Amino acid sequence: METSEPLKPLLLAFPGPLRDRLVAAVLSGEKVMTSGLLKEYEVEREELPPVGERSALIDSHGQEVAVVELTEVRVLPLGSVGLRHVLDEGEGHTSVAEWRAGHEAFWHSEEMREALGDPSFTVDDGTMIVAERFRVVERLV
C-alpha cells in the first residue's frame, strides 16, 4: 500500500472569525483567490508554491476541511490589484479601495507585524504581493 505525504496546510488569516469567514467563502465557491505578502515568504524562507500544488485548507480548529489545487500564482505590486482580483477573493468587497482597506488593516495588525518580525511594517503601492488562484478539488467535511 502506498503512503502519500501529508498535504501542506493552506492557512487563511489567523484562527478566529476572519479565518472562519474565508474558509466558508472557499467552501461555497465564492473565494477562488487569496493574496499574501511576498515578505511573508521571505521571512519564512519559503519558496513560492508551484501551479498544480495541492494543499489542505485548515479551519480555525486546525481541521482539514478541503483539498485545494493552485491554478495560478502571480507576484505583483499591491498598487496594480484590479477589480477582477478583488471579486475573485470572494470577501464581499465591491471596490479595490474597499478590498485594500481591509487587507491593509490585516497586514498592519499587531499579529501580522509580529509574524513578520517588524513592529512598524506598512504597505504601499509598491509592496509586492503573491496572488494565488485555486480550485477546490475535494471537500473533507
Image (cartoon, helix red, strand yellow):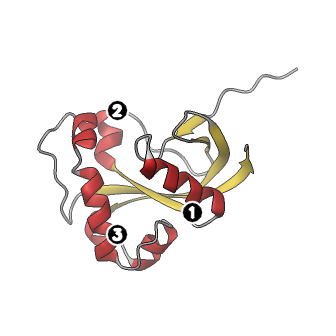
From the viewer's side, name the closer residue of 26 and 134: 26
- When asked about the image quadrant of residue 4, the answer is top right
**Which image quarter holds the N terminus?**
top right
Which residue type carries mark 2? Glu
Q: Amino acid at mark 1?
A: Val
> Element type at marker 2?
loop
**Residue at label 1?**
32
Judging by the rendered image, the residue that carries numbered circle 3 is 99
**Amino acid type assigned to the residue bearing label 3 in the image:** Trp
For residue 84, say whether it is visible.
yes
- Relative horizontal placement of residue 54, taking residue 73 as reference (left or right): right
- The label on residue 44 is 2
Where in the figure is residue 33, as x and y percent of width and height? 51, 61
Q: Residues within 10 Å of mark 3 (few under 14, many from 20)?
A: many
Measured Cα–Cα span from mark 2 to mark 3: 25 Å
Which residue is pictured at 34% across the width and 32% down the height?
Answer: 44
